[in-house]
Image (spheres, grey):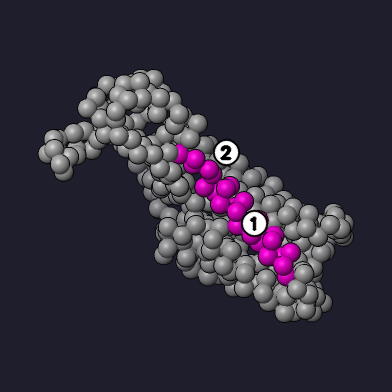
């Protein structure tokens, strides 16, 4: 008899155990093979992302005295006053945070986070001897910010974290799910950037670190959330059914009817509501004009769209 894993174990392990408990051996083998492949893919992605993160730190921000935020920023600051490397400090500072992660999220998340944090620490120390990749501070700020953002965003997307404030932010996202990850990062990074200006006594370095942190915030939201670039259309017309039919057939978009009533006329009307990609919006508008030039149409931007053809709310990142 198989004992089901307790809370905190990876979802795949629990599902595999359920299959075995029910005697579904063939399903178990198939599920197990799939889980192994997905797990291997996940850790390969984490490994590459960790290297990219370390490159952003060791080749751009750290050698140019920029502490763009988070545990990495704190480690860069401390490395100037303590006889320890930035990579080593990253690991040491992360230990209590990872312990919190085990308590809050269980071992499923934290094992991958420990793996990511360890690789980042190791790669950061390995790349440090190469020194700055550029002497242009602005380019270093931008390049470092982009590399760190792409790395962290990629690791978040596979369900892990890079340790540090990532775990704290993941906890905050559970409490404030509508607050974007990049914005939370920016607030916390601003605190570290301010501290770096005080410690380094170099306002220019602090300002460049702020540029790097801003770049990280913007790029991270792009990696995590993408660019919806969608338009929300409300169409009021006496030919709602004809318009809806053409929208469905010609450009293959979802259409919803909302029952409305004119306040002046008292007439009942079907109001068409639909969300379209920015590139498709002109086609939808043209269909409306062709079918009913006198229709009333409201077009507004949709900042985020969840659902089929867009983002999944339930797989939304941290």
- Label 1 belongs to which residue? 216
Q: Where's residue 288, x and y in %? A: 34, 26
Q: Which of marks 1 and 2 is nearer the N terminus?
A: 2
**Percent x, y of residue 225:** 52, 47
Q: Which residue is drawn at 57% across and 38% down?
A: 37
Look at the picture and state if 14 lies above or below 95. Answer: above
Whether residue 47 is visible here, answered yes or no, is no
Callout 2 crowding tier (Cα within 10 Å): few <14, some 14–19, many ≥20: few
Residue tagged 2: 37
Q: Residue at x 64, y 45 (%)?
A: 45
Residue 65 in which image quadrant: bottom right
Cα separation between marks 1 and 2: 31 Å
- Give the label on residue 311, or none: none
Residue 226 covered by magenta stretch:
yes
Does any portion of residue 293 appear in the rendered image? yes
Q: Where is residue 297 in the image (x, y as percent from the top left)?
A: 33, 35
Q: Depth check: 296 or 74 in front?
A: 296
* Element class at badge 1: helix
Q: Callout 1: 10 Å neighbours few (<14), some, many (20+)?
A: many
Q: What stretch is highlighted in magenta?
A: 206-230
The residue lying toward the viewer, choosing from 219 and 25, is: 219
Q: What SS does tag 2 mark?
A: helix
| Residue placed most toward the observer, 171 or 36 | 171
Q: Count how many numbered circles sit on residues in the image.
A: 2
Q: Would residue 265 be found to the left or right of residue 80 on screen?
A: left
Residue 97: percent from left, percent from top: 58, 70
> Which residue is depicted at the point 64% across and 59% down?
214
């Amino acid at each position: 008899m198989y004992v089901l894993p307790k809370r905190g174990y990876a979802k795949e392990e629990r599902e595999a155990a359920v299959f075995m408990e029910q005697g579904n051996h063939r399903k178990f083998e198939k599920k197990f093979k799939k889980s192994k492949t997905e797990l291997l893919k996940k850790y390969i992605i984490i490994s590459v992302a960790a290297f990219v993160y370390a490159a952003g730190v060791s080749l751009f921000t750290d050698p140019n005295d920029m502490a763009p935020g988070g545990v990495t920023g704190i480690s860069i600051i401390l490395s100037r006053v303590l006889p320890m490397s930035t990579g080593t400090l990253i690991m040491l500072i992360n230990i209590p945070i990872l312990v919190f992660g085990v308590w809050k999220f269980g071992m499923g998340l934290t094992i991958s986070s420990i793996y990511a944090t360890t690789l980042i620490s190791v790669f950061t120390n390995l790349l440090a001897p190469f020194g700055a990749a550029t002497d242009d501070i602005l380019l270093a700020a931008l390049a470092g910010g982009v590399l760190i953002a792409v790395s962290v965003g990629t690791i978040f997307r596979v369900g892990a974290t890079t340790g540090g404030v990532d775990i704290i932010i993941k906890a905050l996202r559970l409490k404030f799910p509508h607050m974007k990850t990049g914005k939370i990062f920016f607030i916390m990074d601003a605190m570290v950037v301010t501290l770096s200006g005080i410690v380094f006594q170099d306002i220019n370095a602090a300002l460049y670190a702020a540029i790097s942190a801003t770049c990280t915030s913007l790029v991270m939201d792009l990696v995590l959330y993408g660019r919806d670039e969608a338009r929300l259309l409300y169409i009021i017309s006496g030919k709602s059914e004809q318009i809806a039919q053409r929208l469905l057939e010609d450009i293959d978009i979802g259409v919803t009817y909302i029952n409305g009533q004119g306040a002046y006329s008292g007439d009942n009307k079907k109001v068409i509501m639909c969300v379209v990609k920015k590139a498709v919006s002109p086609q939808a508008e043209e269909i409306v004009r062709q079918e009913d030039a006198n229709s009333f149409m409201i077009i507004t931007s949709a900042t985020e769209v969840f659902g089929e053809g867009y983002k999944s709310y339930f797989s939304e990142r941290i």
